[in-house]
Image (cartoon, rainbow, N blue to C red):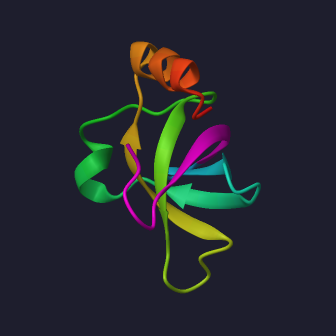
Amino acid sequence: MPKEGEILGTVEQMLGGSRMIVRCKDEKVRVARIPGKMKRRIWVVVGDVVIVRPWDVQGDKKADIVWRYTKPQVARLIQQGLL
């Protein structure tokens, strides 16, 4: 579950260089990046549900991806009414 300062979002477009466009639950579109330690562990594609942490500077436009949900986890989020 998202912690304080984190938001659920859906990946809309891949930009390359571990950057992508994410539509967040607060109705803002942000350019998100996958930090180096996460880049080696997860594979993010268009349509994935992720948790993003907006930056302190330019928080309305940029963010970091901190978690990617699997399909069973997304189904559970839908059942709980979070998506």
Majority SS type along the magenta span: strand
Q: Is residue 13 magenta?
A: yes
Query: Residue extending furthest bottom?
Result: 57
Could you say where residue 54 lies in the image, as x and y percent from the top left?
Answer: 52, 69
Q: Nearer the viewer, residue 12 or 59?
A: 59
Number of marks in picture: 0
Residue 30 vertical placement versus 10 (above, below): below
Could you say where residue 18 lies in the image, as x and y percent from the top left?
Answer: 47, 50
Q: Quadrant of residue 1?
A: top left
Q: Is residue 47 magenta?
A: no
Q: Nearer the viewer, residue 58 or 45?
A: 58
Name the residue at 62% across, 30% down: 46
Position of the C terminus, as image quadrant, is top right
Residue 17 shown left or right of residue 25 in the figure: left
Residue 26 vertical placement versus 67 (above, below): below
Residue 35 shown left or right of residue 40 in the figure: right
Q: Nearer the viewer, residue 71 or 43?
A: 71
Name the residue at 40% across, 64% down: 4
Name the residue at 32% across, 46% down: 39
Residue 61 vertical placement versus 3 (above, below): below
Could you say where residue 22 lies in the image, as x and y percent from the top left?
Answer: 65, 48
Could you say where residue 32 lies in the image, as x and y percent from the top left?
Answer: 55, 57
Look at the image and give the residue range highlighted in magenta: 1-15
